[in-house]
Structures are given as C-alpha cells and as structure tokens.
C-alpha cells in the first residue's frame, strides 16, 4: 500500500478519494493494486490513454537529446508542431506555444487587445463558460461565483447569455475587440453550440469588425468527432486556443491565429520561458502523429455514438448531450456527486459537471469492451 502525506501542498483541492500510481491505456491502478476504468482522462487530457508508448519513447529520446534552451534560440521540434497544427486548422495561421489552456487564452486576450488598439479592448464571453484561472481568464470565465474572492479583477470583460445572438449583438459596442466562446461549454455542463448560433456569431463579428476567438482547450484535437469542434459546426474563427490533449499529459498549450491577426504581435509583446520547449513539443509531435495514424476524429465519432446510445438506455439517465467523446449524462434519480462517488467505488472514473449531470470523456482510443464495461458499471450504480 502507498501512503502519501499531503501536508506540504496548498489546499486548493479537496483531499483526493484515491491515489493513483500507474496507468496504461484506459486503465489506472491505485497503491493497493486495484484497477479503475478512466472515463475522465485527466479532464480530457490523456486522449491517447495513459503511458502511450509512442509518447513515452518520444519523451525519453528528447530528454537525452535537448531539454531546454529558451526562446532566445531556435529548436527543431516546435516549428514542426506549429506547422502540423496550422495544417489541421486549415492553414493560413501562426502559433504561439505556452504551457496550459489558461495561458493559451491569456495569449488570445492579449492578442485581441494588441489587434484592437487602445480603447478597443473588451472581450465578450458567455455565461457558463470556463476559460482559466489566471486573473484575466478568470474574468473571461462566465461564472460570477468564481470571481468574488478575487475582486477587483482586470477590466475589459463582458458576459452574455449562452446561445443568445440578440444578447451578444447588444453587447458589442466600439470598445469590443473580440468574442471568446467555447464550441462546447465543457465545465459549464457539456453544452454544445448549435451550428446556427456559431454561424450567426461569425456574421456578427464580421459586421462589427471584431475577432471571433474559440476556446478549443477541451474540444480540440479529435474529441468531438472533428479535429476541432468548430470544423464540425461549420465556422472558421480568427483565433483558436488549445492545450489538454496536445501533450497527452505533458503540459503544453497553443494559441493559433490567422496570419494577419497574429501580425499584431511584435517581438517583445508576449513571451514565455517554457512555451514550445523541446520536451513538450516532442510529446506533441508524437501525439499528433498517433492521432493522424489512428484517425481519432473518426474513432471519437463512432465510439461517441455508441456510448451515447448505450447511456440513453440506462435507467436513471434522462438525457445525453455533447459531441463525439465529450458527453454529459443527466441523472434523474440521484445527485451527480453521489453517482460519481459510487462509480468510483465500483471502479469507474467519471466526474460531475453540474448538480445533475456527469461528464464522460474517455480516451479517443477506447475500445467497445471498455465502453460496455463503463455502461455496465453506471447501470449497476444507478439501479
């Protein structure tokens, strides 16, 4: 049995219900050797599963070759990954590398301000959104309860109702530089935007001359059945942020922008010590290679449809929503937190996104047998 003392850690998280010591594919093991089926994936991070050999080999090789020189100097891997991401996004853009989704959104916010110029700096986002925990991305996050402890927050942020074009239109005045939205609100409850809504937002941004920035930190890189959710929903944004799945557990984020928008940044406007360093980008290069070889968007679409259908037949599940392998199941019989705790005891990891809904975000390489096992456990728990 593994005993871990957490006294030296700041208490920014509650005490964990379990401590994991090993992972492989869709499975995790605790210190007592008990196995768990992981349908959280580190919050949609380990999209190729745990300890994927291609990623592990890439990390080991890069660690023996070159770990870090800073962005004062060039390296080989980062530009390769940037070119791959630009290709997957349809081309015509440039990438800034950082270490997390919050940092990717910070980059997008700064880019919008630099692009808009003085007096045109406001970013409009939606209630129910989640964009990060830094002061700026916290204020962009449309959850006022999370703001109160940290007031005063940086100015320049405005929130409107989700999926309400009229509210957005009323909020865009000459001070607005950009609209920042998630194609699927992840932490807000797995709420997909409709194609009609995003198309209307794109038209409105074009009419008012503001940037459309999409936060694809949770939805990007195959999870929703397309490389990026906006491609499935039929819009082309000006800025896209990503992180999570890009490193399969290695901290890396990226902000992509159309080349003419990216040109607003001049040398010295934005920087990061670790962003794009060789270890993280070596992991990302391996991740993207496996994702393309496995055609993970198609796998997520097929597996997601199968999981969605099975969940809809579980007694106690009143509705299922989401795209691809980013799904939420509404639970009619018990509070979501009780279901999550019971599922953990039964060997399945899911997490609550609202008081009544649980999120399921398994590896994009999840097997049919693993999906069946997850549904079996949930059926048992809910019965």
Image (spheres, rainbow, N blue to C red):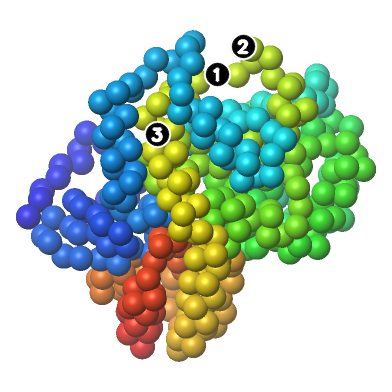
User: In the rendered image, which residue does mark 3 sit on?
Assistant: 282
Q: CA distance from mark 3 to mark 2?
A: 25 Å
**289 vs 34, nearest the viewer:** 289
**Which class describes the residues within 10 Å of circle 1: few (<14), some (14-19), or many (20+)?**
few
The residue that appears at 13% across and 55% down in the rendered structure is 31
- Give whichever of discs 3 and 2 has the lower sequence position: 2
The local secondary structure at tag 1 comes to loop
> Measured along the vertical axis of the image, is residue 230 above or below residue 325?
above
The residue that appears at 73% across and 29% down in the rendered structure is 259
Disc nearest the viewer among 3 and 2: 3
Q: Which mark is residue 268?
A: 2
Quarter occupied by residue 6: top left
The local secondary structure at tag 2 comes to loop
> Measured along the vertical axis of the image, is residue 319 above or below residue 153?
below
**38 vs 144, nearest the viewer:** 38
**Which class describes the residues within 10 Å of circle 2: few (<14), some (14-19), or many (20+)?**
few
**154 vs 30, nearest the viewer:** 30
The residue that appears at 74% across and 21% down in the rendered structure is 264
Could you tell me which quadrant the C terminus lies in?
Answer: bottom left
Given contact means CB atoms under 8 Å apart, are the residues at marks 2 and 1 in contact? yes
The residue that appears at 48% across and 16% down in the rendered structure is 74
- Give whichever of discs 1 and 3 has the lower sequence position: 1
Residue 104 lies left or right of residue 373; in this view the side is: right
Q: CA distance from mark 1 to mark 3?
A: 20 Å
User: In the rendered image, which residue does mark 1 sit on?
Assistant: 271
**Which class describes the residues within 10 Å of circle 3: few (<14), some (14-19), or many (20+)?**
many
Q: Which mark is residue 334?
A: none
Residue 258 lies left or right of residue 151; in this view the side is: right
The local secondary structure at tag 3 comes to helix
Q: Position of residue 177 (x, y in %)?
A: 79, 32
Given contact means CB atoms under 8 Å apart, are the residues at marks 1 and 3 in contact? no
């Amino acid at each position: 049995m593994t005993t871990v003392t957490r006294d030296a850690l700041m208490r920014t998280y509650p005490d964990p219900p379990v401590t994991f010591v090993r992972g492989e594919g869709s499975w995790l093991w605790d210190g007592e050797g008990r196995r768990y089926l992981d349908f959280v994936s580190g919050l949609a991070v380990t999209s190729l599963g745990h300890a994927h050999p291609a990623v592990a080999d890439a990390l080991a090789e890069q660690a023996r070759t070159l770990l870090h020189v800073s962005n004062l100097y060039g390296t080989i891997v980062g530009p390769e990954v940037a070119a791959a991401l630009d290709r997957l996004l349809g081309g015509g853009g440039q990438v800034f590398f950082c270490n997390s989704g919050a940092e990717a959104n910070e980059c997008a916010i700064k880019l919008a301000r630099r692009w808009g110029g003085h007096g045109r700096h406001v970013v409009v986002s939606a209630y129910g959104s989640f964009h990060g925990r830094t002061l700026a991305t916290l204020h962009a996050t449309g959850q006022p309860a999370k703001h109160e402890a940290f007031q005063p927050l940086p100015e320049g942020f405005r929130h409107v109702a989700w999926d309400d074009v009229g509210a957005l239109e009323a909020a865009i005045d000459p001070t607005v530089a950009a609209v920042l939205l998630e194609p699927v609100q992840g932490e807000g409850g797995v709420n997909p935007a409709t194609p009609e809504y995003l198309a209307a937002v794109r038209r409105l941004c074009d009419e008012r001359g503001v940037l459309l920035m999409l936060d694809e930190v949770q939805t990007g890189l195959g999870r929703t059945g397309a490389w990026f959710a906006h491609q499935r929903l039929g819009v082309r944004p000006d800025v896209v942020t990503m992180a999570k799945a890009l490193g399969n557990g290695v901290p890396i984020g990226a902000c992509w922008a159309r080349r003419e928008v990216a040109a607003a940044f001049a040398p010295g406007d934005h920087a990061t010590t670790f962003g794009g360093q060789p270890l993280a980008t070596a992991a990302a290069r391996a991740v993207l290679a496996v994702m393309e070889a496995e055609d993970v968007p198609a796998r997520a679409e097929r597996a997601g449809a199968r999981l969605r259908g099975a969940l809809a037949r579980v007694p106690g599940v009143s509705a299922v929503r989401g795209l691809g392998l980013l799904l939420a199941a509404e639970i009619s019989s018990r509070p979501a937190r009780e279901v999550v705790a019971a599922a953990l005891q039964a060997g399945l990891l899911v997490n609550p996104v609202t008081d009544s809904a649980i999120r399921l975000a398994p590896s994009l390489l999840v097997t049919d047998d693993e999906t069946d096992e997850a549904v079996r456990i949930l059926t048992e728990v809910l019965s």
